[in-house]
Image (spheres, helix red, strand yellow):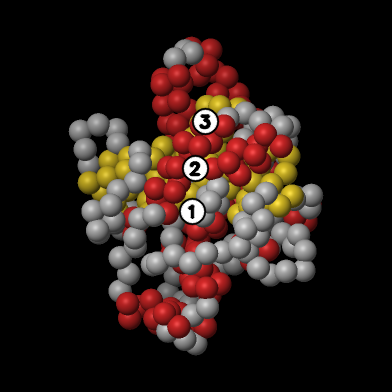
Amino acid sequence: MSILTKWSDSLHGFFSSAGGIVKSITNHNLLLGDAREKFIRDVLSNFLPNTVHVGTGIVIDSENNYSNQIDVIIYRHDFPIFRTLGDSDVYLIEGVIATIEVKSTLNAESMSDALENCESINKLNLSVKEESLNCFANNIFNSQFSDLELSQKMHILQQLQPLTFIYGYKGYKSKFNDFSNSIKKNFYNPAFLPEVIVSEGCVAVKNFENKFKLNDSEEWKGFVGKTHEKPIRYLLNGLLQSYTRSMGTSVHAGTSVMYGLEKYISLEDDDFKNWVDITNTKMIDRNV
C-alpha cells in the first residue's frame, strides 16, 4: 500500500471527526458549511507546497466571463489575485490548478449545485497564445491544434484546463444507485465533468480514454463509479496529479535531473477494480 493511500485513509477518519466536532457546536447550515470549507482549505494549505495558494472566491477569464462562487480554489502563486474586503477573492482562470466544491451533505439538490459550479469553471476560456498551443500540439501529435482529431484535442485541453472536484462529508453512504442517478440527472456534457466526486461511501471518477478498462474500447466512457469505505484517496490522488501537471516535475538544483514522484501518487491495483459505467457517453467537441 502506497504512503498516499495510507495517509489518505487516515485523513478520511480525520475529516469525518472534524465534521462531527463542527456540528456539535452549531447546526446552522451556513456556518456549518463555511467551517467545513475552511477546514478543507487549512488541510490543503498545510499539505500542498508553498508554490500554491488555497483560497475561495470566483474565477474570471479575459472575456469578462466569471464562475459561480467556488468553495476551494488551488491557485499558482506566480499569478495575481484580485483581493476584496471579504474572505472571497477573484482569481484568473489561467492560474487555477484545481477547484473543490465542499458539501456538508451530498444529495440530489446539493449534487446539482456542485456540478453547476464545476461547469461554471469549465466554461471559462483560457487565454493561450496560438503559437504556443500549436507548438504543444506539434510536440505531442506532430500537427497543428486545429488539425487534430477530437480525442487529441481533448487530450491537450485536459492538460491545460483546471480540474474540478466535489467532496461531500455526508451522503449516499452505500447507496450507489441514488448516487449515480444524481449524476446522471445533471449530466449532459462530458467536457464539464469534474475529475472526481466523493461522498460518504461512494466515488465517481472521470474515465478518460477508458483508463479503468471497462471493455476493450479506447473511446470516451464518461464517468465510472463504485462504493468505497474511504474514497477520499481518489480525490487526493487527483489533486496531486493536478499539481504536478500544472507546476511541472521538480528537478535537482543546477541540473536537468527530474525526480520521479509518480509512485507516491499512483493508485493501487485494487483501485482499478469493480467500477461501473455511469454515463456511457462519448466525447463531444468544445472550443479552446
Mark 2: few, some, or many residues within 10 Å (few <14, many ≥20)?
Answer: many
Q: Amino acid at mark 2?
A: Leu
Q: Residue at x 64, y 51 (%)?
A: 279
Alpha carbon distance from label 2 to label 1: 8 Å
User: Real-space Cα distance between discs 2 and 3?
Assistant: 10 Å
On the image, numbered disc 2 is attached to which residue? 115
> Which of pointers 3 and 1 lies earlier in the amino acid sequence?
3
Q: Are marks 2 and 3 in contact (CB under 8 Å)?
A: no
Q: Quadrant of residue 45?
A: top left
Instruction: Check residue 192 in the rendering and tell me which mark sits there, or answer none.
Output: 1
Residue 269 point in image, percent of width and height: 78, 56
Amino acid beneath label 1: Phe
Tell me the crowding category of disc 1: few under 14, some 14 to 19, or many 20 or more residues within 10 angstroms, Cα based. Answer: some
Position in image of residue 90 (x %, y %): 27, 45
Who's the residue at 72% across and 44% down the image? 226
Q: Are marks 2 and 1 in contact (CB under 8 Å)?
A: yes
Q: Where's residue 195, x and y in %?
A: 55, 52
Residue occupying the point 46% across, 36% down: 113
Q: Which image quadrant: the C terminus?
A: bottom left
